[in-house]
Amino acid sequence: MGVGVEAGAQAARSRALAVLRIRSRALAVALLPAAVAVILLAGGSSGHLVGRSWDLARWIMGVAAIVVLLAAGAIALVVARARPAVSPTVAIAEESAPDLYRMVRDLADRLDVPAPSAIALTPDCDSWLEDRTHPSHGPPPQESGDEITGVRSLTPGRSRRTAAAPVLVIGSPFLWWMRVGELRAVLAPVVAGTGPSAHPDIAAARRFVRGLDAAVAVTSAPRGPVFRSVLAGVGWVARLLLRSCRGHAAEMERGVAAAAAERAQAVDYGLRIVAQEQVGLAYAGWDRLLTRVALPAWRMGRWPSRLDAGVVAALTELSRRDRLAEGFASRLGERPACDLLEEPGTIDEATSLLAARLFHGGPAETGPDWAPVAWQEYPEEVVDRKWRTDAARLHRVLDTLGVRRAPDPTPPHHDPPTLARVVDHLTDPTTTAGRADDRTDGRADDRYGEADAVDPYAPDATLTAPSTPAQPEAPAPHPEAAPHREAPPEPEPYKAMAADDDDEELGESGSPHSAALAAGLTAELAREEAATPPISAAPPGQGPDTGLWDDTGLPLFPLQPPRTGRELLADHVTAMVCCAAMDTAGALPGLDWLDGPTLLVNGERAADLAPRVLSLVEDGDPAPLRAWLMDLGIRPEKPVRLV
């Protein structure tokens, strides 16, 4: 073990010296004109370099030396004052987690390395060491307590050396899902990295690289034309130096990681193999929880306040469904790592709010439009509101498109919010006619394993087909109703967008009705997002590590790309079906830890709804959905309650 550790550490030191040599060369280049100017001045004063040509050379080199020294000083000042990037975390004080600090210090003693200076949590499934010794990252200096005025105390120096160790950043899902022994095994190679990090050459090389990276960020920030022109040269030099030492810095970090991994071999090696399996499982559960459960709540202005506890529920549910993960649930009887915290609920709430800021861009503090929600309140506060809000948006777009179910032009101008209105609009007449011909010929469509007998929810023959927005030249079906109805606000953009969505998103089988409705929903959501007020920054002193990272570019890590028109339409039609099921058949909104919002019919998940909605959206075929509605006793002609 000692040979491997020494080899990795030696490789890291050699690469660190290479980085420092690049820094020394840059300093030498900056001092070269001044050195030449000094030689010329010394030669003139000693009577060796005399004459008009030497006098001119002395003036030129003197001016050049002054300009180069000023430029080098400006670059050095920017590199030294620039604040290096810091990961967004929730700081954990030792008073709030004494057992966790004790475990980390014991682990550092076993590895014979310096203990981390502090511990912080991040809403991610990863752990690392982070250097926060830059003056802008530390607390304000405390006043000296010396009795003799004017004598500098030695306490700040000792504190600075003590705080030179990096900060241990732990993924918060690990604390809730892993057991204490598993967490110690996972953290062993991370804590072992404090040994090579304490070497002066490696620490100096890291500070130089981080300073260059921070200087590039400063020069790239949007500023006025004067500052931009002044900082352009600084940015060019910083990028040149960064490119020169990039390869050496990468090899240095690989050497540090190799030395740390080799040193950690002696600590819980067998348990670390098992713990690595838990890392992958926790990552899968955390990703599923964020994308399927947390994201719908964030979009509704609610943030789940116990995300880490939700990981345990999600992975337990996965163990119940997946036989491959059955053995993982048996570990739940052991002591969880979150017991090392004094108040795990408070820390879970802080990391949950930070996750909402990082992955969704939510505000820094709670408010009327950004409130925490507990898991037991999730079905009512999030699922029910989401479905009814989507259903209301769907009917607003139908009203904008002028979709009517009856030819009666008299007020009221808008049809009641019923599921039948949506199904009739999305039904493709050619598909319905084809299915009627199949029934006439004695053939049945067994796509869903059901025979299409008499359809009790078939559209009435007296209903007029709505106008097709994808054909601008078609006349309005009811010109006599025009004086009694307001003109649609933006029908033409919907028609233009539908022409593209019909082929790109809904495919060749998508009907013009679906394409137009998908385009309308996209435009409506864009208007709602544009009308949302900008998110204010966190007040000073509030939020997780607010002074250490820039929150102007939130969200830093978007979870999903923007939804396509087809996905939006399918989500809104599904929401309308769920609203009809809740209002007419007694169904309930529910929470599935792996799939997010779900519809509970007679206490069971309605897992077969999605393919039937897609059949209506993509193919314009309502028969599978109508058969499903009839089996569950859902009345599509009844109005539903909207938000």
Image (cartoon, rainbow, N blue to C red):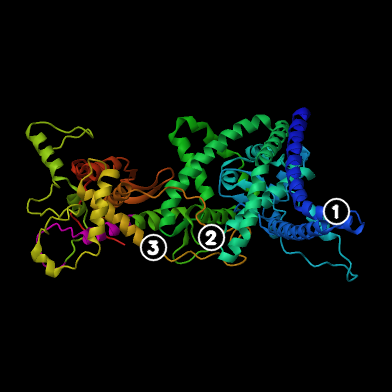
**Residue found at x 47% / y 50%:** 558
Residues at marks 1 and 3, CA–CA distance in whole angstroms: 65 Å
Q: Is any atom of residue 272 visible in this view?
A: yes
**Residue found at x 75% / y 44%:** 20
Tag 1: Cα neighbours inside 10 Å, few (<14), some, or many (≥20)?
some
Report the mark closest to the observer, 1 or 3: 1
Labels 3 & 2 near each other (Cβ < 8 A) = no
178 over 484 or under it: above or below: above
Q: What residue is shown with label 3?
A: 530
Task: State the residue in front, 455 or 70.
Answer: 70
Tag 2: Cα neighbours inside 10 Å, few (<14), some, or many (≥20)?
few
Q: What residue is shown with label 2?
A: 552
**Residue found at x 65% / y 51%:** 238
* Amino acid at dot 1: Ile
Q: What residue is shown with label 1?
A: 39
- Quarter of the image that includes the N terminus: top right
